[in-house]
Image (spheres, rainbow, N blue to C red):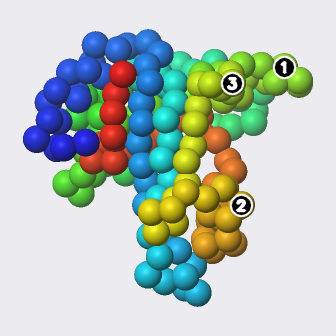
Amino acid sequence: MDMSNFDEMARLFLECTGQFLTVCFESVKKPAAAHKGRTLVKRTTGVFRAGLQFANLGAVKEGIEAGERGEVEPLPWGEWVHYPYVIRHKGEYYIRLYPPFARDENGELVPHWRPGQIRVEYTVDGSQVNKDEFNSFLTPSDARASGEVPHCFTVKARNVVSIG
């Protein structure tokens, strides 16, 4: 997103407390040494929520109660510019997005998108590829990490392609 539009983006998020909205963002991944010079881009378009407090997520509360995680602590990096929407760190702005949650087969709250609520596209040097091919250009540890779905996404504001 054009950072000259930062105030407009912040306004959109400040008006979306807990609401579901469609957000598209891209991230450029660092290739493994054997593929140096390749451009790896992951584009995610999905339904997210904005304006939530991490400590108030049902999955977080249940994890604390069950002793599966510790209490929520302050941000490990950066500072809130518009709590709980926008973080600033080393001159960059980041937005906080949350996936929808649903109970899994064990009754635990986990990030979960229904069909059609999330789309991830992978490109290598501008050509679309599938996830496995994309992961073959990453280091093994980065390829393994790409399958994890976090409880919240912290996305560089400049990587946001569209909101709504």
Position of 23 compared to 71: left or right?
A: left
* Residue 75 is at least partly visible in this image: no
The residue carrying mark 2 is 132
Report x, y in % for residue 115: 69, 24
The residue carrying mark 1 is 107
Q: CA distance from mark 3 to mark 1?
A: 20 Å
| Type of amino acid at the residue the image marks with label 2 | Asp
Q: Residue 115: give its label.
A: 3
Position of 5 compared to 99: left or right?
A: left
Q: Residue 45: give its label.
A: none
* Residue 16 is at least partly visible in this image: yes
Report x, y in % for residue 149: 64, 41
The extreme front residue here reads 127
| Type of amino acid at the residue the image marks with label 3 | Pro
Position of 86 compared to 74: left or right?
A: left
Specify the quadrant of the image occupied by residue 68: top right
Q: CA distance from mark 2 to mark 1?
A: 30 Å
- Looking at the image, which is closer to me, 75 or 108? 108
Instruction: Name above or below for residue 117 compared with residue 156.
Output: above
| Type of amino acid at the residue the image marks with label 1 | Gly
- Looking at the image, which is closer to me, 115 or 47? 115
